[in-house]
Amino acid sequence: MHKRFLFIGVLFLLLGCGRAPTLEEKEEFTPYLNRFLAYSKQNGRDLSASVNVTYGNLQGKHLGVCEEAWLQTPHVEINRAAWGASPESTKEMMLFHELGHCLLGRSHIDTKVSAGPSLIPSSIMGSHGVPGRLYEQFQDYYLTELFNRS
Ligand SMILES: [Zn+2]
């Protein structure tokens, strides 16, 4: 869900960063962005960074990608087909995952924690995120983990 290829950064320096969101994209993604900023504030992190969230032409199974380039506003691209086919909980998880990269500077972490008798991914920053039903069930845990891990 995340790639940070150097050539993308170089390309954006030459061509300018990803495009600004359309009105449709703003209406779709702003509520998630606002929730992300509110949760962040609740967890003692008042983020002032801005980010552009748009639909993008992502290859294969990539659900989303955070693209960062020097001196440019970070840009999250979302796979339109995957987004449209996902339940609400999965949408929030996938967008928050990308914002974790773009706004919190988080990298992937693929460890597990025990939740009762089962092992679950320790973070939505796992390379494959977490299944929507787990995110829904353990949302408080995942949000606390997302904003409090340095
Ligand atoms: Zn990722």
Image (spheres, rainbow, N blue to C red):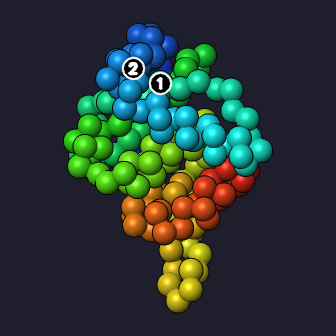
Mark found first going from the N terminus, 1 or 2: 2
Q: Quadrant of residue 102?
A: top right
> In the rendering, at what x and y percent does residue 138 appear?
54, 67
**x 26%, y 37%: residue:** 80
Secondary structure under the numbered disc 1 in the rendered image: strand
Q: Nearer the viewer, residue 107 or 122?
A: 122
In the displayed structure, does residue 108 sit left or right of residue 83? Answer: right
Amino acid identity at mark 2: Pro
Q: Quadrant of residue 105?
A: top right
Q: Residues within 10 Å of mark 1 (few under 14, many from 20)?
A: many
Residue labelled with disc 1: 52
**x 60%, y 16%: residue:** 71
Q: Quadrant of residue 12?
A: top left
In the displayed structure, does residue 25 sit left or right of residue 135? Answer: left
Picture layout, residue 126 above or below residue 77 = below
Amino acid identity at mark 1: Asn
Distance from disc 1 to disc 2, alpha carbons, whole Å, reads 6 Å
Residue labelled with disc 2: 21
Picture layout, residue 47 above or below residue 100 = above
Q: Nearer the viewer, residue 38 or 109?
A: 38
> In the rendering, at what x and y percent does residue 24 appear?
32, 23
Q: Is residue 5 visible?
A: no
**x 48%, y 69%: residue:** 137
Q: Is residue 43 visible?
A: yes
